[in-house]
């Protein structure tokens, strides 16, 4: 068993390379331990991850704000406080804040994370527009 009180958590981290568009503030809660890494990430409005996947999947738990998540080739889904998302192993996806809201989520990543290309502004806007057209996000 490993017990890490808040005063001993690694805290704010700087990720190698560019893995976010916009401002995101990752806080390392549990460094890689037995293939599990836990980060609490806060995103400013419109900020988001690059496309990525995880060897053994990822669990997101939304703790504040509103956001979006989308798997490659799938529909974009709105994220709200209390939502939990399971992304299966190897599934390319991105997640981040709605254009008009901050978002904070806890990301439990299983295995290695494989970062890919940026979700460009056109791709992000198309995902957000689809949510608006469906009546999910405010216009």
Image (tube, rainbow, N blue to C red):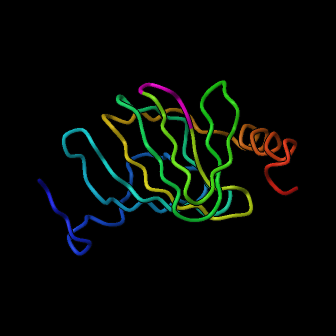
Q: Point out residue 58 in the picture as x, y percentages from the top left corner.
A: 42, 39
Q: Nearer the viewer, residue 94 or 19?
A: 94
Prevailing secondary structure of the magenta residues: loop
Q: Splitting the image into 4 quarters, where does residue 124 fall? A: top right
Q: Point out residue 127 in the picture as x, y percentages from the top left corner.
A: 74, 40
Q: Point out residue 13 in the picture as x, y percentages from the top left corner.
A: 35, 60
In the image, the segment drawn in magenta is 89-93
Q: Nearer the viewer, residue 55 or 82?
A: 82
In the image, farthest residue toward the bottom: 7
Q: Residue 60 lies in magenta, yes or no?
A: no
Instruction: Report the label total.
Output: 0
Q: Which residue is pictured at 48% across the width and 34% down the height?
A: 87
Give the vertical position of 122 relative to 23 (above or below): above
Q: Which residue is pictured at 16% across the width and 62% down the height?
A: 3
- Taking the image as shown, residue 40 lies to the left or right of residue 101, namely left
Q: Residue 90 lies in magenta, yes or no?
A: yes
Q: Splitting the image into 4 quarters, where does residue 77 fall? A: top right
Q: Which residue is pictured at 31% across the width and 60% down the height?
A: 29
Give the vertical position of 50 relative to 83 (above or below): above
- Taking the image as shown, residue 138 lies to the left or right of residue 85, namely right
Q: In which quarter of the image is the C terminus?
A: bottom right
Q: Nearer the viewer, residue 82 or 116?
A: 82
């Amino acid at each position: 068993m490993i017990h890490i009180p808040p005063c001993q958590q690694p805290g704010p981290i700087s990720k190698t390379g560019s893995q976010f568009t916009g401002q995101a503030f990752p806080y390392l809660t549990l460094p890689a331990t037995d293939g599990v890494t836990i980060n609490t990430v806060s995103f400013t409005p419109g900020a988001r991850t690059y496309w990525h996947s995880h060897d053994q999947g990822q669990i997101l738990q939304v703790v504040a704000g509103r956001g979006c998540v989308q798997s490659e080739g799938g529909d974009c889904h709105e994220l709200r406080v209390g939502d939990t998302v399971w992304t299966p192993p190897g599934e390319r996806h991105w997640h981040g804040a709605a254009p008009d809201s901050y978002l904070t989520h806890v990301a439990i990543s299983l295995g290695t994370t494989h970062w890919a290309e940026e979700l460009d502004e056109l791709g992000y806007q198309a995902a957000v527009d689809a949510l608006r057209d469906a009546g999910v996000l405010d216009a």
